[in-house]
Amino acid sequence: MLGLGIESTAHTFSCAVIEKKGNKGKILSDVRKIFRPADGEGIHPREASRHHIENSSSVLSECLDEANIKISDLDIVSYAAGPGLGPCLRVGAVVARSLASFYKIPIYPVNHALGHIELGKLLTGARNPLVLLVSGGHTMLLAFLNKQWRVFGETLDITLGQLLDQFGRSIGFASPCGKNIEELASKSSNYVTLPYSVKGNDVSFSGLLSATKSVAKTNQVDACYSLQETAFAMIAEAVERALSFTRKKELMIVGGVAANKRLSEMLQDVCKRHGSKFYVVPLKYAGDCGSQICWTGLLESKVKKGTLLKDTFVTQSWRLDSVKVDY
Ligand code: AMP
Ligand code: MG
């Protein structure tokens, strides 16, 4: 079975083709174009959507060429229907609807967060993990129970990705800034005390953001190091509590921030203490990409015949814990 997946929730426009045989999936192509705002600026939804419109046709053609298939070979098309930025979401949905209606291909709206998790499971081999989803749009701890992903902790304000990006932009980096902060942080081991805020099993990062900006006025390197140490320790505490509560024997980390080595190091320590296996999504597929959406669509096609075109919505704030997972 061949699927096409389209991702356009925020900065990335991506198309991917996956071949599914039984429970196995083979990524035949995954092409991405990423909207890069000017240094120090964030993503403007309208500008990002214009970027997606301008690049959608070339990304799709390249994706089909690389997979060596024609549109008429596709069995399904899926697109990220939310959560995300409205103008950006609409671009992916329009491309998917056009293909579905013209070529009569079944269409599947996919929850973006579910996409991160399902592709993570496919690529790591994790079976029943506690999931830490840390990206630009999410900071969530999740475990699967009775056909739904349940939240065991989340951010009360900004996400971990936003914390890193907003701080990075304030010291002049171009968004996304996580990698630059990681590089600068590795040059220091001088910890400056910063606000540490874990409430129950939720985290709050906005106070940490303001305080780190103040530290950066005198030393940007120490600020990066201390920011990572504080934010990741907060996450590790929440993960540790959720692991001991759910007694999961696997922890899987997905989302763009999963690329960070220091975060993995801290979480590996937590897993050792609890006798749990640690899985991290491969770097290439940590950030947003069409494969996440494609694989989830293919899984849904096991139990659903597709969605009527009139119901192919986009929803900016579509929470993962409201999605029924029947496959
Ligand atoms: P996503 O929304 O899943 O595409 O993830 C994007 C987020 O991942 C952005 O906030 C980036 O700053 C962050 N990110 C990417 N690479 C790293 C890294 N090496 N360390 C920390 N954060 C990162
Ligand atoms: Mg994402």
Image (tube, rainbow, N blue to C red):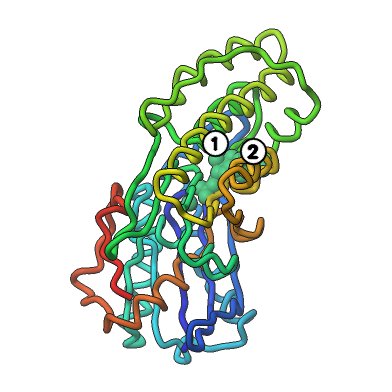
Give the answer, above or below, for where 25 lies relative to 118.
below
Determine contact: label 1, label 2, CB under 8 Å.
yes
* Three-letter code, disc 2: Met
The x and y percentages for residue 283 are 66, 56
The x and y percentages for residue 161 are 52, 38
Look at 51% across and 15% down and name the residue there.
195
Within-10-Å neighbours for mark 1: few <14, some 14–19, many 20+: many
Quarter occupied by residue 113: bottom left
Give the answer, above or below, for where 138 lies relative to 200.
below
**Considering the numbered disc 1 on the image, is that residue within a helix, a strand or a loop?**
helix
Quarter occupied by residue 260: top right
The x and y percentages for residue 92 are 40, 63
- Frontmost residue, 77 versus 39: 77
The residue tagged 1 is 236
Quarter occupied by residue 284: bottom right
Nearest to N terminus: mark 1 or mark 2: 1
Looking at the image, residue 306 sits to the left or right of residue 116; the answer is left
The answer to whether any part of residue 41 appears in the image is: yes
The residue tagged 2 is 266
Give the CA separation, mark 1 to mark 2. Answer: 7 Å
- Most distant residue in the left direction: 310
Look at 67% across and 18% down and name the residue there.
223
- Most distant residue in the right direction: 187
